[in-house]
Amino acid sequence: MITCEQIYDVIVVGAGHAGCEAALASARMDCRTLLLTINLDAIALMSCNPSIGGLAKGHLVKEIDALGGEMAKNIDATGIQFRILNTKKGPAVRASRAQADKQLYRLRMKRVLEQQKNLDLKQGEVTSLCLDGAAVCGVELRSGISYLSKTVIVTTGTFMRGLIHIGLNNYPGGRAGDQPSVGLSDQLRQLGFQVGRLKTGTPARLDARSIDFSKLETQFGDSPPRPFSLSTERITMPQMPCHIAYTNQRSHDIIRSGLDRSPLYSGVIEGIGPRYCPSIEDKVVRFPDKDRHQTFIEPEGLDTIEVYPSGMSTSLPIDIQIAFYRSIVGLERVEIMRPAYAIEYDYVDPIQLHSSLETKTVKNLYHAGQINGTSGYEEAAGQGLIAGINAALRVRGSDPLVLTRSQAYIGVMIDDLVTLGTKEPYRMFTSRAEYRLLLREDNADLRLRDIGHQLGLVSEQEYLRFAEKRCKISEEMERISITRLQNTVQQTAVLVRLGLQDIQKGTTFEQLLRRSEVCYDDLIELDPVSRETSEAIREQVEIQTKYKGYIDRQLEQVEQSKKVESTRIPEGLDYAAVKSLTTEVREKLSKNRPDTLGQASRIPGVTPAAISILAIVLKSSSWKGNS
Amino acid sequence: MYIRDTIAAVSTPPGNGGIGIIRVSGDQAAAVGNTVFTSVSDGGLVSHRFSFGTIRDAATGEMVDEAMAVYMRSPRSYTREDVLELHCHGGWLVVERVLALVLACGVRLADPGEFTRRAFLNGRIDLIQAEAVMDIIASKSEAALQLAQRQREGALSKRIDEVRECLLQALALVEAYIDFPEDDLGQTDEVAIAASVDSAQTMITDLLATFEEGRIVREGISVLIAGKPNAGKSSLLNRLLNENRAIVTHIPGTTRDIIEETISFEGLAIRFLDTAGIRHTNDLVEQEGINRTMEKVPQADLILAVFDGSREFSQEDQMLLDALAECRIIAVVNKSDLPQRLVLPAANRFLATVMVTALSGDGVDSLKQTVCRQFLHISATDSREFISLSRARHRDALVSADVYLSRFCAGLPERNLELLALDLRGALDSVGTVTGQTATDDVLDRIFSSFCIGK
Ligand SMILES: Cc1cc2nc3c(=O)[nH]c(=O)nc-3n(C[C@H](O)[C@H](O)[C@H](O)COP(=O)(O)OP(=O)(O)OC[C@H]3O[C@@H](n4cnc5c(N)ncnc54)[C@H](O)[C@@H]3O)c2cc1C
């Protein structure tokens, strides 16, 4: 065994979406960082859909950007269709989504990594961790070399003991065309980690030349496209449409006819799949009354004929796949370029992590991304960023960064994962956030830019731009609260046109804006100063004014829960000795070992009564003995 | 472990007559027993066995009372600590005296509810049980006991689960349209959402109605007897009290001449307010007495307006009714044995009209039943099946849920889904505080089982 002499601060295992953010964050925080990955040509590869964002996921991307991560910039530079979803609904549930040119996305990320100071990028498969007592101190590669480091971040995605299924055929693989990672998860199990098995799947990639697009609905992106990143001025990539097609009864009959050769229904697959990303056979079986299922045919890039039929993932045998895709109107002559498949892989239950993403079992070891049971690029990237930050903070000897549930979707996600663990692939939804009105895409910078800047991930120049924006927002908020209607002839005319003739002279612009029929653009007609306000400021002022009542209410709830959230539970608390808890609750708490009372309160089955007891126990100064 | 000092208190409500129990809990319980109590049989206290004996002042040797004592060794006791109970026979003064002797042994007077708190802390009972036990302690009548009992058995939790179910369904519908705009879900099903919310709200309203009932069962109802002099108020009161002599209690109030009389009928505690005024004025024409009665009107849950059936409706009667304009009144027409000359105006102004002959007692039972019926649904009390919300905490939770739902309904036409979701979630969280459940995962479950979702 050859050991490299250099001792890195941080080693990141895997250059997927989690690993890239982790490595960039720690390198940007001045840590000597090594990023190791099985295949340098598959960095930040989109294993599944060629798109970034969507509901809650778009929120994650904007948060990553506000903190100084790379994902938003990367999609802005390589996106070929941008859309804002839910525009008819309120600001909190509007979300951005983009189609990516998959190859350009990966290549740009590789370039960014290559140009990053403090960051070494090497190809190699990590087969085990090196340990120094209860702490990790490096990694060992299949090639026989080991690298030493102060911290290690594992982001192996779907690769650990990956097993690919197409019909009843299966073979080891980390993703179609990639080697699996073998050995690492066995070692983790030996170290005492609970390692489980999950499953996910992806549709076939189809040949666009064999599709009759004239029979499909066309869906264009927004014009002009709105970028994800605060740093992106404009989207310059050429834009492409998607197309919408539907399955029919015949498709469903074909699918049913192949169920006996489905690895899922014949019991070959043991891993648990995501309910929100069911395969087409799952949809047909679980919703037999639905007479059609929708699919978006998404381009995989500008320069390729490969297209991705979303929602049509399957692990049925190849002959059924061909027949079923061809039963779709417009796809009668379609050719499959890469077959659909399902993949099973090892994950490590995230209940074994602290909120910093450091493992409870092995010190200085962090897990991020799909290894934690999540699925999705954005979820992975969000965790990767936090793990990278926290590994760097550990190297510096500082306290970890833990985002709260009222601060960020990233905070909600990590809290969910480490408090509840997961038995099925975890995906972000806006409904997981109890403070949804506070966690909007539009205010991600207001929530997180300061933190990113303090960590050193946001450049001075970018931060200054933000600070100026924030300043302008509060100035404008102040201005509209003291600017009053004069009811000049011109203003009255505008009010009459808006149907607001009953409005009193002296009404402030703020009061006016609070009315549901008035928007900021109407103010422009009433008052020349408003015309000068930039788009971004207008948006913020309008949202903060219109939703003030609701936002204040949520802020109040945040305030109320602060006490519980900030009450720490000593790490070694002996729950068995707290006799007043029911056996069930005691077992749950002993298993989950929550860091705070707030986390404890979110464990299902832990009642408010149990929380009161715990609060009493923690408060009672006489409870020293067992803790 | 936490420090267990020994505590003591009288554990029977003051003024209950009969036996007074002093309870001691903590490590010194046995020592206290051996100091103040002398068993007539072969000395010493045996765990979980009653013994008969005397309580003496250790300092003077003077005998204070004859008593029964029982010692319960930890953990087989209410608090799971060592517990001693002294059952005294003497009146209130004696009980006070015995408590003083116990405290003289160096134990501390318990805070209100501290025994139950210890029971709760030591895992003997959970919080909902603890609250129900607090109710039992305060309960004056058997219906209250049963109510407390049923609550412990989870009838309330079950009904609340049903409310929750409806709310989850509604929230799942709303959330699905928020989180899956690109899935082919069709139009927002506002009708179904509104229907679910509506059934939840109906259930909440019903539960809240039973809260009032729960309070009444627990605290009893207050009844005021009013009427012009000579209508027969005092004989009616005597009749109402007579048959229940055995459980009549006399609770001295703060003012010397306000005396409450309580009877228990069909498990409902009925308290007669300011009966002193009625009894002692002896139906004399005395404005003072009437004034005093009127002062009590705001405290009364119900007024019995007594009329003399043998006389015509008089101006005095009218004045009385005017004074009681806002009250819940049962008209009691007395002297039904005599030729009837009374014609009551606006009879539908009364909850009921009952004919009695106070002197003989005819009709008094029917009057009592009529009184009970105003407060307990007949079928409900019969089957003992009604679910009452008796704790203020539960009531508050449901009231708050109800407020959220009203706001939800008001906001429905604006179709602002994420604000609607906020109100639904608020309602769910409020309801969840009763049973301790959070919503997120259940909502997702419902979304995925109701809709075919996924790209
Ligand atoms: C078939 C399939 C279907 C999917 N379907 C969906 C879906 O429907 N919806 C959805 O949201 N997400 C889906 N995904 C998941 C999505 O691709 C992942 O969630 C996301 O890419 C996870 O990011 P990650 O960084 O954790 O891991 P990955 O992107 O998987 O990256 C892991 C990286 O680690 C490297 N690596 C692994 N082990 C080692 C090792 N021992 N040594 C060195 N390097 C190593 C790999 O080479 C790879 O570069 C699917 C993935 C697959 C494979």
Image: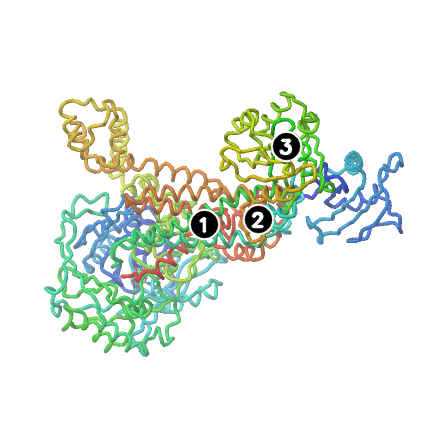
Q: Are marks 2 and 3 in contact (CB under 8 Å)?
A: no
**What residue would you read off at disc 1?**
B203
**What residue would you read off at disc 3?**
B273
**What residue would you read off at disc 2?**
B128
B281 versus A204 height, above or below: above
Q: Distance between the residues labelled 2 and 3?
A: 33 Å
Chain label for disc 1: B
Tell me if the residue at label 3 has its CB under 8 Å from ligand 1: no
Q: In this view, does A115 lie to the left or right of A627?
A: left
In this view, the mark in front (3 or 1):
3
In this view, the mark in front (2 or 3):
3
Residue B55, by quadrant, is top right
Tell me if the residue at label 2 has its CB under 8 Å from ligand 1: no
Disc 2 residue crowd, few under 14, some 14–19, many 20+, Cα 10 Å? some
Q: How far apart are marks 2 and 1 (CA)?
A: 21 Å
Question: What amino acid does circle 3 point to?
Answer: Leu
